[in-house]
Amino acid sequence: MKIVIVGLGVIGGSFAMALKKAGYDEIYGIDTNEETLQKAKRMGIIKGAGTTDELYEADLIILALYPRLIKTFIMNHGHRLKPGCVITDATGIKGMFIDDILEMLPSEVDFVFGHPMAGREKKGIDFASDQVFMGANYLITPTKKNQEKNIALIEQLAYEMGFKKVRKISPACHDEMIGFTSQLPHAIAVALINSDEEGRDTGSFIGDSYRELTRIANMNEDLWSELFLGNKDNLLKAINNFELELDLIKKAIHDYDAETLKQYFRKSTKRRERLDV
Amino acid sequence: MKIVIVGLGVIGGSFAMALKKAGYDEIYGIDTNEETLQKAKRMGIIKGAGTTDELYEADLIILALYPRLIKTFIMNHGHRLKPGCVITDATGIKGMFIDDILEMLPSEVDFVFGHPMAGREKKGIDFASDQVFMGANYLITPTKKNQEKNIALIEQLAYEMGFKKVRKISPACHDEMIGFTSQLPHAIAVALINSDEEGRDTGSFIGDSYRELTRIANMNEDLWSELFLGNKDNLLKAINNFELELDLIKKAIHDYDAETLKQYFRKSTKRRERLDV
């Protein structure tokens, strides 16, 4: 199977490593950064830089690009891909481009939309790793045009790369869930660290909690502004729901109401324990 | 040096382990739970259960108790402690009891207030570990009554137990910082997980970010309600400042303002990177 990975950043690079490790060796990489390509070649995770020849002969194309570039890629190359070719992506939101892409894609090319729920707070191939997918969740948002065997292929690859659980859901449900589980935590982390007062030696006063809650405040600004704005309504709803809960806690503190606080803590403890099962 | 640790929960137990590992072997433990005492003895981290004899002969007493019990302990035992005895604690807030304690404490007993900034989301000796202090911050809030040599003793013990940095500050500054770096993150974690809608299979849609931001939502409800209410004004201020930042992010999303979002992300990234230095 000839695989072409478009974009060898932290996610594309990790795909290359994990697929290589799983035994796939006809992997080509495409990247606008020549140095990244050389590095990937030296690391032995790609057979070589992919030209349009490889691209148009590929059995599987993995798009590890910024969200807004997915549609551009299909616009530029979709009609020249090999019949039977399967495309997948790694984009954190789906609703913003799925319908458009399905409309412009030739019927003999099948786009199986995927979302590996793993990443690093740093960007670039230097932070890629075949470990980052281990035990993580993988989401697939099937469309009416998808062939069963192609969905099965992506699912199989996900397990081969180390993902623990593959879940299939609608794009709308995906974006709603992701607004809550991924984008809201990032918004919180940014707001938390930005709400610190300037000039305090905060680093001397932190424990694991602050360290953990702000790790993801180290943001790829281009990627995350696209993700936030591409999922605007879901994210705003998630932030509002979160603020309502925080206001309940505030009220209990203000009222010096230990019993109500404990009730919130018991609820959060139960929910957190359930998550680990 | 005869050491008595009062309260062998996750923190007291970790103190015993870390001190034992650092070479101190005359360590006695006091706990209301007989099973905990037996366990600590079997683990070899205490020489034995401490009676009032040991307590009143101790050179160093470590109080690893719930905040409200600190004052009670001094009230019951303060006047019977050995002249020259040093007491320290592990409480996450200071302002609520320091003045009262200084008032009732005999002048020949020295209370050096301390706060090891490390913990676990679970309670009890089963979760104690001599690793939990490794690389962590330790805070001391000196008072006018403290003798230099006793502050130096606690500082030395902290380093011997594996803490990386010991910082001395006023109780007021301590509580303000802790409201931001410790209590606010806990309030956020609780609100985040409690704002999830009931009945969704959220566990299939999470990545490391949600996992990390909610780990501490597993709360010891008795401890944290005391900490929240004992630091009411500082915590409410920290929550309000955080909400202001979150509202800025909300507004930028609402206005579809990528440039402003990126500006917030650059600020948070810079602050987070500085934290790791």
Image (cartoon, coloured by chain):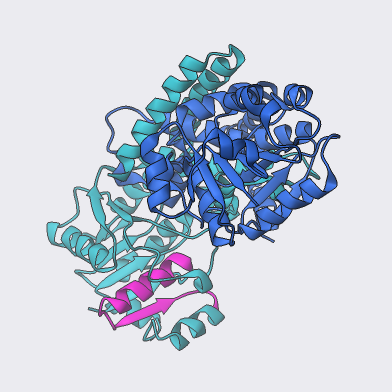
Chain colours: A blue, B cyan
* Residues drawn in magenta: B10-33
What residue is rendered at 81% in x and 31% in y? Answer: A107
Q: Which one is in front, B37 or B45?
A: B45
Q: Is residue A230 rendered magenta in the image?
A: no
Q: Which one is in front, B106 or A248?
A: A248
Compared to residue B272, the image places residue A195 above or below, namely: above
Residue A170 percent location from the top left of the image? 80, 36
Q: Which one is in front, B155 or A86?
A: A86
Residue B260 percent location from the top left of the image? 47, 16
Judge whether residue A15 can be spotted in this image: no
Q: Which one is in front, A133 or B162?
A: A133
Q: How many marks?
A: 0
**Residue at far front of view:** A53
Residue B245 percent location from the top left of the image? 48, 23
Q: Is residue B129 left or right of residue A202?
A: right
Q: Is residue A98 left or right of residue B170?
A: right
Q: Is residue B68 left or right of residue B221?
A: left
Judge whether residue A103 can be spotted in this image: yes
What residue is rendered at 33% in x and 53% in y? Answer: B101
Compared to residue B251, the image places residue A154 above or below, namely: below
**Residue at far left of view:** B148
Compared to residue B255, the image places residue A41 above or below, namely: below
Q: Quadrant of residue B269?
A: top left
Q: Is residue B25 rendered magenta in the image?
A: yes
Quarter containing the C terminus of chain A: bottom right
Residue A95 percent location from the top left of the image? 72, 27
Compared to residue A203, the image places residue A152 above or below, namely: below
Q: Quadrant of residue B73?
A: bottom left
